[in-house]
Amino acid sequence: MIADKFEVLKRYFGYSAFRSGQEKLVDSLLAGQDVLGIMPTGAGKSLCYQIPAIMMDGITLVISPLISLMKDQVNALVQQGVSAAYLNRSLNEAQYRKALANAVNGKYKIIYVAPERLESGSFLRFAMNAEISMIAVDEAHCVSQWGQDFRPSYLNIDSFISKLDRRPVTGAFTATATKEVKNDIIRLLDLKAPVEVTTGFDRPNLFFSVLRPQNKSAKLLGLIRERNGQSGIVYCSTRKKVEEVCGLLNNSGISATRYHAGLTDEERVKNQDDFVYDRKTVMVATNAFGMGIDKSDVRFVIHYNMPKNIESYYQEAGRAGRDGVDADCILLYAKADVNTCRYFIENIDDNEELSAEQKEFFRKREEERLRQMVFYCTTSACLRGYMLKYFGDRAKDCCGKCSNCLTEFETVDVTVEAQKILSCIIRTGQNYGVKMITDVLRGSSSERITRARLDRQSTFGIMKDLSVAGIKYIIEKLEEQGYIISVGAGMPILRVTEMSYPILRGNASVKIRKARHLRSRAPKTELRAVDPELFDALKAVRTQFAKKKGVPAFVIFSDATLADMCLVMPTTEKEFLSVSGVGANKLEKYGEAFLRVIREYKK
């Protein structure tokens, strides 16, 4: 057992100091206390259990939901000099038996295992006879049916632990958890008075933006071409849209692949590997892709369609910039996305374990989550601040790193316009959606309006001088401020709330913020500050090692570590160890090759 956590941190992982929250979680696990760590993607959750695992006697079991995460993390640990393995369905019978035999013989310090594997007789027999010092439950929110990624197999974890001769110390880790989900994690995993650490949800290296393009396809192509050669993910809401967008990118000369539940297991694995190993630059996927993906150099995540809640969006967007380097999170918003999300909510698969009351509560909660997601897309406030406050975190009024903070707004009094819109909604019986209300206000002579005799309403044509977009924008702001609500799935109808009546009586005013000018975004600095010639030379060496060892390039060294090499310019082994992300094991394996490049460059 290694006694010094800082020695482990530097020797195996190449870091000289812990990030926020890590040290407390490490100390608690080493002291035999259960923990619950809620840390954003890229904050270093895995180190919180990997360091105690290396320091403790015996084996650590890491329960993880996805094969991709196990594979990537085991690859990284082996490269860092830690004996580790995974046991999941990607192994054939012979490979599984060999890995299990090695585990029985004490070859591994850390074993990653899928939750379904806990019910296997052979694995249970191994576990009951092994010295298991710790159990780490990754993506712990999957245990809660109120979370966005509920997996029934997670409910068996507590039963598995209870069958062991001695209960190991247990840690649960997740990137996002509401109060409900957090309570479920503690209860369903039977954590014993866990030490709780929530580090906050902010990712300062991520730039958030919401765009509302007239032509999404053209905008997407432009965004990706601006980021030529950078690794990125494009999320779509349906399998059909994934196929369309992937085809569009490939036909436009962009190296892209796809991932969704309609593909075979073999094709999903192949496509994912093509992306992780940089054989394809862009992954186009549904939300079936990504949880646990450890690819650290994703420079952008673009949502072609709006997700159904902020929890999902923040988790998916958070797959960008895991190495701490600047990255973009861009959402292409269209009103039609809201209807797609409502359809999914209304047609969600029934969970037989829920009562009728629980199902209705679940549906209403999903509707409210969707409403908050729409407000994120339409707000003129700081986007980062909006999300942080949603998760109960503190936030500044202006972050300086989102599209809204770079936009100059002017405050406009729209009380008269609001009175006209609210009056139209009421006088048409509160039975119509945004399009119909807009058409009535603009005096459209469509057959649908004349057939419903809405052309005889007193509000018909009273806003004919305002554009369709202008009326819809004010309606969005009225809904955001609580004067209007949308009701129903598919094509929802507008209804006024009690807050609207003081406006109609002239006893209150309505003000909204309208965009006037978008300031130029400051250039990214973290990688561009280094010499591109040296950086590319180091990347070439990294690629050679990655191909030779059959691992993703970021497993050798992350982009952030290469950038630090460019800044430190080490020429000796001692100086090379001072680079962030370089430990003793990687110095021994790769040091001389990278030092040779730097020495030649300095000449």
Image (spheres, rainbow, N blue to C red):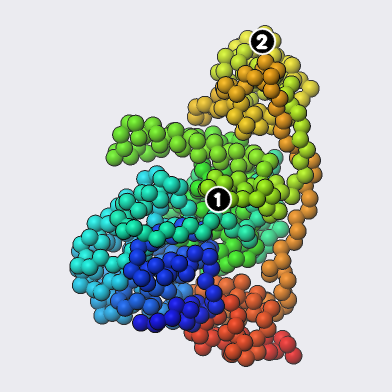
**Where is residue 441 shown, x and y percent of the image?**
70, 19
Residue under the image location 69 percent in, 19 percent down: 507
Among the 4 quarters of the image, the one containing residue 254: bottom right
- Residue type marked 1: Asp
Q: Relative to 546, say whether 347 is above or below.
A: above
Q: Which residue is mark 2?
A: 457
Q: Secondary structure at mark 1?
A: loop
Q: Which mark is residue 163?
A: none
Label 1 environment density (alpha carbons within 10 Å; few <14, some 14–19, many ≥20): some
Quadrant of the image containing the C terminus: bottom right
Number of numbered discs overlaid on the protein picture: 2
Q: Is residue 357 above or below residue 459?
A: below
Query: Is mark 1 in CB contact (under 8 Å) with mark 2?
Result: no
Q: Which residue is mark 1?
A: 393
Q: Position of residue 560 (x, y in %)?
A: 61, 72
Q: Is residue 413 visible?
A: yes
Q: Nearer the viewer, residue 424 or 270?
A: 424
